Image (cartoon, rainbow, N blue to C red):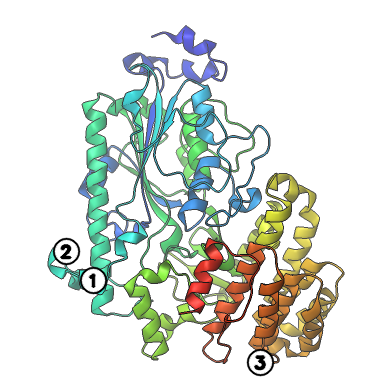
Amino acid sequence: MRLAAIFASTLLLATAWTVGAAATARGAERPNFVWIVTEDNSVHYMRMFHETGAPTPNLAAMASQGLIFDRAFSNAPVCSVARTTLATGLYAPRVGTQYHRRIKPAQLPEGWRMFPFYLREAGYYTTNNSKKDYNCEEGSGVWDASTNRATWRDRPNRETPFFHMQSFPVSHESSLHFTAKQIDPAALRTDPRTVALAPQHPDTELFRYTYARYHDRMKDVDDIVGRMLAQLEEDGLLEDTFVFYFGDHGGVLPGSKGYLHEVGLHVPLVVRVPENWKHLVPLPRGSRVQGFVSFIDFGPTVIHLAGVPLPGHFDGRPFLGRGITAEELNARDETFAYADRFDEKYDLCRSLRKGRYKYLRNYQAFYPDGLQNNYRYNMLAYQQWRELYRKGQLNEVQRRFFESKPVELLFDVEADPYEVRNLAGDPAYADVLRDLRTRLQARVKGLPDLSFYPESHLVKHAMNDPVAFGKQHADEIAQLVDIADLALLPFDEAAAGLASALRSDDPWKRYWASIVCSCFGERAKSLADDARQLLDDPELLVRVRAAEFLGILGAADPRPALYQALEATDSPVEALLTLNTAVFFHDLPDRDYRIDLNGIKMRVQSGETDRRIEYLKR
């Protein structure tokens, strides 16, 4: 076909097409791409990935003509951060897009664009139907159409190659936000008696009903896949189109979405390989891929499959296309993930999985996973789980969600898929722990990870160019990481470094030293006097962190400092960070620190602070 016209395209390399000339002569000149994305579902609830999951025959049929990726991961367990990572091919903490949802959108550096831009520049018709949810400015030239009616069928002519992304909310968290009056077991297609519960969940009728309802949503997902494939076949496009099916992050049963466990990150991924372009894939159709792929890799993979030169700024790398071998792909064994703010709830965590082992670092380990998040607790199962905890009716594994966490966790996720047994204290795994800890430390320093400053500081100083800000402050971020990692030492070894940091001239060193003291709790009581000196600190958030430590210790009532901070700040983000601490104390079971906001005159509020205030005033 008209290869000369292709060679003339400014962003296509001539060599990209000589190898595949015979194949392209039988079909389209360039492959098409369709992404079918469903919200909020992990591999744990589909039978083709987990034997206890729901059957998905359409997806299984699609997989027989493509590849099943057994180890595909979102880099974040929530939609806006995950989708921004997908669109940019960049790690969110490096570019300021790690908070769900954005308070101030990040600006990408000059010349950096979302990946569909490069396809469009190369002549592709790019469409999105229609969810975006980006935490950065999109920029121009990304989509030809992005509406709830966008379709590949509107491209200029049949010869125009296309990239189409379509998102479906059928399995979204809100599908489990039913009321007690709406419970209708007779309407289920899944028998609640047959579902397998995660060990973290109590075996109650409500939990079984919630699981069964979610399994039904997986069947709805499968129907969507079948319809989309039928539409492509009807249009005569199926054998020229790579079809990706995946979840936009992990599932929504309690303790998954919003958390760095496998149920929050490990997504189903199936790629249907078109007959006319199977020479671009290093494995035969019907294969299962064991290599690790993450959301940062998806955009670069499509660009590479399209034969378009890959921009150098992406963090991800292609996993399909010319030059990718089966051996190299299956040898990939590492994925990195991040969790920061989810709506109004803060809890800074990072994770690294390498092979069968998963390392999880809780930088604010005193916060329980179950810290109030209004949207999460719309789910009746969440409410019941917490109520059973308060009544003392949960076993040790089920209680953990509502209690403080270890600062680091290590799991063998192949032997322990629901991450029940923490191996971090087992001498038999000391070498594995040390290796993954070191790797994660290198990751956060190497980005550099902007979350070692509070979000309020980033909003004020960094969001016009977060990447440049990170480069300018890389040394200071590395020092803050080192202070945060004093929490990994026995307290006797950490004490001198903490005392020095608490007295530092740098407010963020004082900030992080106070957080680490809170992680140590009673073990750090010798530093209480140093912390008291910070209750009048020039930096408001240092005062909040000092009060947090003293309140955990029982050495001082934290509420006066919190109330003063709420009245003093003119930053809605500082107010939100302060209210996060207030809610933590409000619900703390072993301290009488109920928060009373009556008479507190805040100068600033936002949608996020309103949610915290609403909860505290219930």
Give the SS element for disc 1.
Answer: helix
Query: For the point 50% across and 32% down, which residue is it?
Result: 116
Residue 266, percent across and down? 43, 57
Residue 543, percent across and down? 74, 76
Q: Quadrant of residue 263?
A: bottom left
Q: Which residue is mark 2?
A: 188
Q: Amino acid at mark 3?
A: Gly
Residue 282, percent across and down? 42, 34
**Numbered disc in front, either 1 or 3:** 3
**Which of the numbered marks, if any, corresponds to residue 217?**
none
Q: Which residue is mark 1?
A: 209
Give the SS element for disc 2.
Answer: loop
| 278 or 268, nearer to the observer | 268
Mark nearer the N terminus (1 vs 3): 1
Mark nearer the N terminus (3 vs 2): 2
Could you tell me if the residues under marks 1 and 2 are in contact, i.e. CB atoms within 8 Å? yes
Query: For the point 46% across and 35% down, which residue is it?
Result: 320
Mark nearer the N terminus (1 vs 2): 2
Q: Is residue 402 left or right of residue 278?
A: right
Q: Which residue is mark 3?
A: 554
Query: For the point 25% across and 36% down, which residue is it?
Result: 229
Among all residues in the image, which is located at the extreme left?
Answer: 186
Among all residues in the image, which is located at the extreme right?
Answer: 505
Q: How many marks?
A: 3
Could you tell me if the residues under marks 3 and 2 are in contact, i.e. CB atoms within 8 Å? no
